Amino acid sequence: MQIPLERIESAKEPQAEPKQKTVEVQTVFRESGAQTDPFSPEYIVNKDNVPEVLSITNFKFGAGLPATMIEMELIDQMREKRAFEQALPPTSDEACFNLRRKLVVEAEVRDWEKREEDIKRNQNDRLNLLQSALVEREKETEEKHA
């Protein structure tokens, strides 16, 4: 294949640069409307073999991720609950059913006690914050009056 002579000659001639150009700039900032949720394909899970990662699908970035100690405790509780449920006896006969009912009731009582403990801890934390804010306000008032 041979290149025509006119094309070679036109390549040697310098092109005059235009006096005005249109230039676009990409910034590091993004419009919030342009950001999309990541694609999550549909999936089918075998009932007997549910992956552990599906138990934490409610965690999102900024709301549970990256995981702090609180989320790690929640994940450990989910693991313990899952192991407990797998260790329960089957409901095949009446004796196993009664044992299973007893174990489930005991587990529910433990869960409620832990929830009550968490609520009390949160209330105490809020009360301490309120008391420290009142002490600060009292100091500011005394300084103002002095």
Image (tube, rainbow, N blue to C red):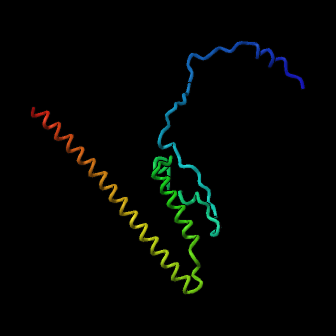
Image check: 48 left or right of 96? right
Percent coordinates x, y for residue 107 in the rendering:
46, 70
User: Residue at (48%, 53%) from the top-left corner?
Assistant: 71
> Which residue occupies 34% across, 59% down?
119
Residue 93: x and y in percent read 58, 86
**Picture residue at 13% right of the left edge, 36% below the top:** 142
In the rendered image, the residue lying farthest to the bottom is: 94
Figure quadrant of the C terminus: top left
Direction from residue 69 to residue 140 in the image, left or right = left
Kindly indicate the quadrant of the structure image that contains residue 50. bottom right
Above or below 55: residue 62? above
In the displayed orientation, state which residue is furthest to the right.
1
Task: Pick the residue in front: 73 or 39.
Answer: 73
Q: Image quadrant for the N terminus?
A: top right
Horizontal and vertical percent position of residue 26: 55, 30
How many numbered discs? 0
- Residue 83: x percent and y percent? 57, 66
Determine whether, in the image, residue 108 is placed left or right of residue 79: left
Q: In this view, does 63 lie above or below 7?
A: below
User: In the image shown, does 82 or 48 lie closer to the viewer?
Assistant: 82
